Image (spheres, grey):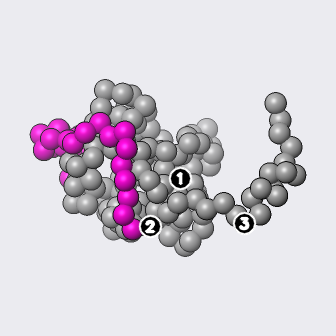
Amino acid sequence: MSFTIKESPGPLSEDELKKLESKTSTLPKDYRQFLLKYNGGDISPDCFNSAEGESISSVRSFLGITDDSILSLYHYLETYENRLPKRFLPIAFDSFGNLICLSLFGADRGAVYFWDHELEADEEDNESPETAENITLLSPSFSGFLQSLYEFKKPDNFDELLKGARIIK
């Protein structure tokens, strides 16, 4: 499936990418190419499922190298440094404060995961982010993740469902 990127900070230079890799690890080739070309941004289509096919969420925006802290890879690296498994690089977020992460090393290098902040490891209970149950595999590769994105389709009875909904003000 093809995708469109909007609101991109613009292409990333090889030097900027090498600076990021010096702070993290060598990035998988498909994700490197994405950063060089787009450097983050809003994607369409944006919905994704788990690797098992369960509907999960949608990508709000991909992170990049930018001065805008809301969209900055560096900002997210610093903010989530002790909250994510060490092998994870946050690469995008959804509208609910959850992250889409890329595994940078280990047997699953290059795999894309969903990190659910609601089920985050609890430091007070001595839970480690490495064993947290808030991590769901989305795809074994970044390019596979991009290819799996789809547009949300309203159910046929959507208007009927809305009629019965109670709006809270």
Amino acid type for the residue under numbered disc 3: Asp
Quarter of the picture containing the C terminus is top right
Mark 3 to mark 1: distance in Å?
A: 20 Å
Question: Label 2: how many residues lie within 10 Å, few (<14), some (14-19) or many (20+)?
Answer: some
**Which residue was labeled with disc 3?**
156
Q: How many marks?
A: 3
Mark 2 vs mark 1: which is more N-terminal? 1
**Which residue was labeled with disc 2?**
148
Tell me if residue 22 is in the magenta stretch.
yes
Question: Label 1: how many residues lie within 10 Å, few (<14), some (14-19) or many (20+)?
Answer: many
Provide the residue span drawn in magenta.
Answer: 1-26
Is 91 drawn above or below residue 3 in the view shown?
Answer: above
Tell me if residue 25 is in the magenta stretch.
yes
Give the quadrant of residue 63: top left
Residue at the spot x=37%, y=53% of the render? 4
Question: Label 3: how many residues lie within 10 Å, few (<14), some (14-19) or many (20+)?
Answer: few
Mark 3 vs mark 2: which is more N-terminal? 2
Q: Please report contact status of discs 3 and 1: CB closer than 8 Å, yes or no.
A: no
The percent coordinates of residue 138 (x first, y second) are 47, 64
Kindly tell me whether residue 156 is visible in this rendering: yes
Mark 3 to mark 2: distance in Å?
A: 23 Å
**Which residue was labeled with disc 1?**
58
Direction bottom: furthest residue: 52
Is 149 drawn above or below residue 58 in the view shown?
Answer: below
Q: Quick one: SS at disc 3?
A: loop
